[in-house]
């Protein structure tokens, strides 16, 4: 299995179609205490390819003004938003399942793109990924490793480990309040990326920086693993 930090050939990916499971990605990022910059994410995912479409699938609350503003921004910054109204369940939870829409769009556009990038950790997409691969397209899965099903990773042509790319996709805090919230998350063990780890990640060889290891003699970037330490809250 290739990894993003150990690409094959010239990494030319042709036309790219991106399918983002918005709710899955949001909750995965929130688990490790970061907020994603979707402009950075889009640029990163399109590396060595040309963007055909970038879809963002999400459940919506029509009364949530902040969410509506976010979705408007997404539409104006390269994303095609596919939304479904949230359903309220007896226990009070709200949820909207867009798995069918994602799978149908991946298959429906197959033949229009060379590479599909599924941003989700949901094992239920394994069958759809196989179906797209059988039609001749390359399928890459992007996600945070702890939130991504091993079965989904196994059926993909490449797994893009977002943990190792956090410095390149994280949204910078734009207020003192946000900076304070991040500091509090670190202090309570909710944000597992400290400065030492971030610096280590930045120094890793990455195709997005265009560096090569001087100790590498086979022309390939060495595979690297980044461990995210969990801090105790004592």
Image: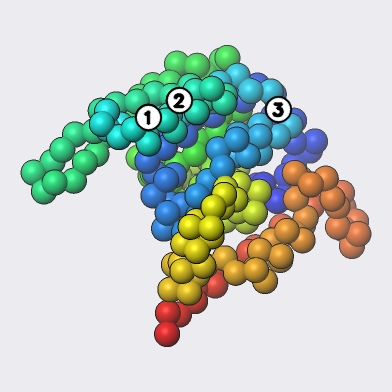
User: Which residue does the numbered mark 3 point to in the structure image?
Assistant: 49
Q: Are marks 3 and 2 in contact (CB under 8 Å)?
A: no
Position of residue 171 measured from the top left corner of the image (x, y, whole percent): 57, 48
Task: For label 3, count other residues whose C-alpha is less than 10 Å away and answer few (under 14), some (14-19) or many (20+).
Answer: some
In this picture, residue 214 sits left or right of residue 186: right
Position of residue 188 measured from the top left corner of the image (x, y, whole percent): 43, 73
Quadrant where the image shows the C terminus: bottom left
Question: Is 82 or 161 nearer to us in this picture?
Answer: 82
Question: Is 188 or 210 nearer to us in this picture?
Answer: 188
Position of residue 97 measured from the top left corner of the image (x, y, whole percent): 28, 34
User: Which residue does the numbered mark 1 point to in the structure image?
Assistant: 68
Residue under the image location 80 percent in, 36 percent down: 10
Q: Are marks 1 and 2 in contact (CB under 8 Å)?
A: yes
User: Which residue does the numbered mark 2 point to in the structure image?
Assistant: 72
Which callout, 3 or 2, points at the residue further toward the start of the chain? 3
What is the spatial separation of the Cα atoms under label 1 and label 2, in whole angstroms?
6 Å
Residue under the image location 25 percent in, 31 percent down: 63
Residue under the image location 50 percent in, 49 percent down: 35
Task: For label 1, count other residues whose C-alpha is less than 10 Å away and answer few (under 14), some (14-19) or many (20+).
Answer: some
| Secondary element at tag 3 | loop
| Secondary element at tag 1 | helix
Q: Are marks 3 and 1 in contact (CB under 8 Å)?
A: no
Position of residue 52 measured from the top left corner of the image (x, y, whole percent): 60, 19
Please identify the residue farthest to the bottom as the structure is shown. Answer: 234
Relative height, residue 156 to residue 137 (above, below): below
Q: Disc number at residue 191?
A: none
């Amino acid at each position: 299995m290739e990894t993003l930090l150990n690409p094959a050939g010239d990494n030319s990916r042709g036309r790219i179609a991106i399918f983002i499971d918005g709710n899955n990605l949001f909750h995965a990022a929130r688990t490790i205490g970061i907020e994603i910059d979707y402009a950075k994410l889009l640029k990163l995912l399109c590396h060595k390819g040309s963007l055909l479409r970038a879809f963002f699938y999400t459940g919506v609350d029509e009364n949530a003004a902040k969410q509506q503003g976010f979705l408007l921004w997404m539409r104006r910054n390269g994303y095609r938003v596919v939304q479904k109204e949230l359903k309220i369940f007896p226990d009070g939870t709200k949820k909207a399942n867009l798995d069918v829409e994602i799978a149908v769009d991946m298959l429906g556009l197959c033949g229009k793109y060379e590479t599909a990038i599924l941003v989700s950790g949901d094992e239920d997409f394994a069958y759809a990924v196989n179906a797209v691969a059988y039609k001749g397209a390359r399928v890459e899965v992007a996600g945070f490793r702890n939130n991504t099903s091993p079965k989904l990773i196994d059926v993909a042509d490449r797994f893009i480990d977002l943990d190792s790319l956090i410095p390149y996709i994280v949204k910078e805090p734009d207020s003192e309040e946000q900076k304070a919230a991040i500091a509090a998350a670190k202090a309570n063990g909710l944000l597992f990326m400290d400065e030492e780890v971030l610096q280590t990640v930045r120094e890793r060889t990455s195709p997005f920086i265009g560096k090569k290891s001087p100790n590498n003699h086979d022309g390939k970037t060495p595979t690297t693993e980044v461990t995210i330490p969990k801090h105790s809250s004592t």
